[in-house]
Amino acid sequence: MNLGYKQAEIGTIPTDWEVKPLAEITEKIMVGIASAATHAYRVKGVPMFRNQNVKAGKLDDSDVLFIAPEYEITFKNKRLRGGDLLTMRTGYPGVTAIVPPQYDSAQSFTTLITRPNQREVESTFLCHYINSEIGQRFFTQSQIGGAQKNVNAGTLRMMPIPLPSLLEQRTIATALSDVDALLGALERFIAKKRDLKKATMQKLLTGQTRLPGFCGEWGLRRLGDVARVQRGASPRPIDSPVWFDQNSSIGWVRISDVTKSGMCLRETTQKLSPLGVQHSRLVARGSLIMSICATVGRPIVTEIDVCIHDGFVVFDDLQADKLFIYYTLKWIEPDWSKHGQTGSQMNLNTGLITSTQVLLPPLPEQTAIASVLSDMDAELAALEQRLAKTRALKQGMMQELLTGRTRLL
């Protein structure tokens, strides 16, 4: 029964909840094996989890090292139990996973190990709390170190934990775990859809599979024969404020704008002044551009008026279906790095791009193939949006349930 609220060091909580340091509700908190790198193998043995295996709420066992049997006795006091928590010390300090029962007696390399006292705290509840926005705030405020931030066992022991009754802890943990199960199912479904799209691209873009109603011959064409490939231009010095104007309608494309977008570019972080436009290359909306520096070979279609610097090319006067060429460029994107010039960073030259050969079916078939792949992209985008909304829902639930604002009992 909700008897009201009180103020605690972590904020406002129900009056019937307690707050205790993590050290008081655990059997032990320790650092995993520090010298494991000299005893780590890819062969079978005792599984050993590292930072990269720790995801928020669960362990990723897709890439696990092992400790050879002859070293097991050396580290026997560091063995894990099902229900233990592993917390990243460096990289993303504070991200925490729970050890599933099948990895009882496994080992951990350098992560922080917490063994909850099951009479006081439920492991899944504790894992959800540590990974919550409130829990992660503790780590942000407690990190030590220089370039590589980290947390230590002493810091973790002091972490304040809200404690409803064990029954309420289990109820909260079950509700949040149900959302996690939905998230996991969505993530797996999206991964399958991505694999299906990849296989479909391979079959359709190489002519291995033909769409119904098409039978014309395909031909190899140089990109320079189907488009006028033009490199962008950059005003110098690049950091001068005279080139920029956030009130301008002309965006200036940066690599980061492209890497965070999908097929279409709808916004840019920076915009160019009229003077900046004069010293760059203006690209009309609806153009196909591609990055040729750093992240090489990433194509995108502009939906706004932009300028491109010399880290991009534009494919003007296309003698082919624009979206078909876009998907063809996406398909060959991983291969560009094999041919690019290296210096301080990878880059491509226009000669390499214009001489690259691509397979082209007749124009109507190009359009039909692009339509199939666009529909698959639209489905993936809808699923990604659903996933994002479900993640936001979980964050809201965590904020409500883990602070007692909303009670389930």
Image (tube, rainbow, N blue to C red):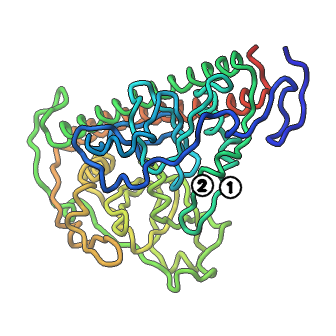
Residue 349, image quadrant: bottom left
Q: Dot 1, crowdedness within 10 Å: few (<14), some or many (≥20)?
A: some
Q: In which quadrant of the rendered image does the C terminus lie?
A: top right
Residue 25, image quadrant: top right
Helix, strand or loop at disc 2? loop
* Label at residue 8: none
Is residue 101 something that shows in the picture? yes
Judge whether 343 appears above or below 76 on screen. Answer: below
Q: Position of residue 249 (x, y in %)?
A: 61, 63
Q: In which quadrant of the rendered image does the N terminus lie?
A: top right
Question: CA separation, marks 2 and 1?
Answer: 7 Å
311 on left or right of 387: left
61 on left or right of 240: left
Q: Amino acid at mark 1?
A: Ser
116 on left or right of 376: right
> Residue at left 60%, top 19%?
174
Residue 71, image quadrant: top left
Most foreground residue, 274 or 260: 260
Earlier-in-chain disc, 2 versus 1: 1
Is residue 316 something that shows in the picture? no
> Residue at left 84%, top 26%?
14
Q: Position of residue 251 (x, y in %)?
A: 55, 64
Q: Position of residue 165 (x, y in %)?
A: 74, 20
**Residue highlighted by disc 1:** 142
> Residue at left 55%, top 60%?
268
374 on left or right of 185: left
Look at the numbered discs 2 and 1 and tell me whether their residues touch, using CB distance below 8 Å: yes
**Residue highlighted by disc 2:** 151
Judge whether 388 appears above or below 341 on screen. Answer: above
Image label count: 2
